[in-house]
Image: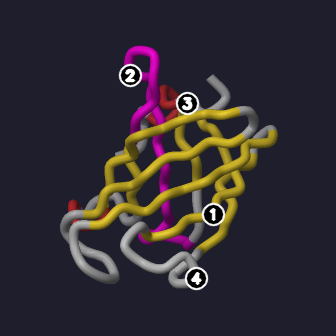
Amino acid sequence: DDVVGVWLGFRVGLNKQYFIFRKYGTSLRGIACGRCDNPYTLAMIDEVTIAGDTLTFYTMHEDWGPGTLPFRNKFTAHVTENEMRIATQQDDRPETELRFTSSLVGPIAIEATAGNN
């Protein structure tokens, strides 16, 4: 329940990153986008697991991105109140390459975004 909703990520304007988590049965799934009006900048969020205070999930990239397609990015996150600290690693690269860290702010209730077009 602490994760379900819209998390606002890095970048600004049209290229802002959004991470949307929804309940699916007893698990979580979602979508990440930035920009969200371009199908090439959408990625499915899957394989969501929670162990203690650590949230792990993958984004699946099939259409674009650095490296060989398709690939997955593994996200390791810690949620504290309204901040999700993330570290990501592309799964087809050595652990020393393309590592990225950032913070997401949220969650915004999905119902609260109904007026956005």
The location of residue 91, given as percent across then percent down, is 41, 67
Residue 66: in magenta span: no
Left/right placement of residue 4 relative to residue 14 reads: right
Residue under pointer 4: 96
Q: Are marks 2 and 1 in contact (CB under 8 Å)?
A: no
Residue at 49% x, 31% y is 110
Mark 3 → mark 4, Cα distance in angstroms: 31 Å
Residue that protrudes farthest toward the right in the picture: 81
Residue 25 falls inside the magenta stretch: yes
17 over 47 or under it: above or below: below
Dots 1 and 4: beta carbons under 8 Å?
A: no
Amino acid type at mark 4: Thr
Tell me the SS state at disc 4: loop
Q: Quadrant of the N terminus?
A: top right
Residue found farthest to the front: 94
Residue in the picture at 39% in, 55% down? 59
Residue denoted by label 2: 24
> Which of the two labelled residues, at mark 3 and mark 4, occupies the earlier sequence position?
3
Residue identifier under label 3: 4
In three-dimensional space, the C-alpha distance between marks 4 and 2, rounded to whole angstroms, equals 34 Å
